[in-house]
Image: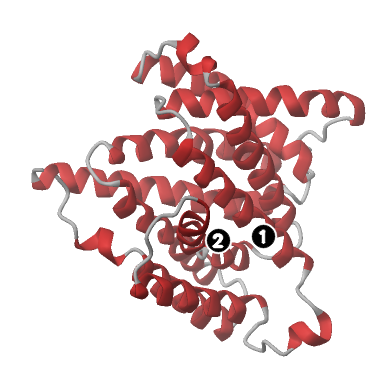
Amino acid sequence: MSRPGLVGAAASLVGATLFWAGNYIVGAEAVRSIDPFSLTLLRWVLALPLLVALAQLVERPDWRRVLAAWPWLLALSLFGMLAYTGFLYAALAATTAFNASLINAFNPALIALAGAVLLRERLTPVAVAGILVALLGVLIVVTDGDPATVLRTGFGAGELLMLGAILSWTGYAVVGRRAPALPPISSTAAQAAVAVLLLAPAGLLTGVTLPDGPSSTGSLLFIVVFPSVLSYLLWTRALLVLPAGSAGVFLNLITVFTAAFTIAVGDPYTSAQLVGGLIVIVGVFLTYGRHLRRRPG
């Protein structure tokens, strides 16, 4: 693969993760005025037509073939579009975007562990060590550097909700590895449609909280356009060049970008968050180091 092609793929991954980091930062602002359920529903209602149009433009899919995989799309939507998104926004209402992103950094290691247990994927001793190191980093983050606090007070609500989010995304990743190969943007659009169909009846019964001003409207529109649509386009473009394992390591940039924003705007953070987050990232790199050593074909 040519150097310009690799540079372009890397730039696409940086852009995708920057927008996903924005989902944490802007999402934390959005949940101040829009409850997590309403934000989840509005996100996919508004993103759905954009995803369908983008899929048609980029992939020109056979929609009958895509929809024929409806059991897989249903499972993927439940884990990814509903559970992960719902847990994430609920967590952002109870903890900081920085803390949530630090816990999310453990997700690649958790996916590797689930792949070994459920899909019998091979884990090297170094990868096992990486998972344990990453788990230690998460423990430091969620206990603010004092693991003994868990015995006294337990985990905070935001941290528990974020653990639910990464468990949901792990389920999404495991199901995705068994699901039939589908055009990725088209599959995302179909999953969004399932999410809307499942959430809309509850929204009609209980009501939906709408943005209450320019700030919350802008936050919602950012979430719809950037992390919901453009990130998937950039990620798909990068996977045409790089192996999925190598691309997955870039997900740690979500934490890096969130941390950079937190520090830049002067939001509070602790040394335990910085140390724990660094340990998590080191652990994930140990887990996926074999992917980084491979030359893209």
Q: Find residue 222 and name its label.
A: none
The amino acid type, in three-letter code, at marker 2 is: Asn
Residue 106, horizontal then vertical, whole percent: 52, 65
**In the image, what residue occupies the spot 33% across and 52% down?**
245
Tell me where residue 44 appears, x and y as whole percent: 63, 30
- Outermost residue on the left side: it is 2
Mark 2, other Cα within 10 Å: few <14 / some 14–19 / many ≥20: many
Residue at (52%, 33%) from the top-left corner? 225
Colour scheme shown: secondary structure
Left/right placement of residue 86 relative to residue 140 reads right
Q: Earlier in the sequence, mark 1 or mark 2?
A: 2
Quadrant hosting residue 191: top right
Q: Please, is residue 19 above or below residue 126 in the view? A: above
Question: Is residue 82 visible from the viewing direction of this image?
Answer: yes
The Cα atoms of the two marked residues, 1 and 2, are separated by 7 Å
The amino acid sitting under disc 1 is Met
The residue to which callout 2 is attached is: 104
Residue beneath label 1, please?
A: 162
Q: Residue 95 at what x, y percent from top left? A: 71, 65
Q: Secondary structure at mark 1?
A: helix
Q: Nearer the viewer, residue 10 or 155?
A: 155
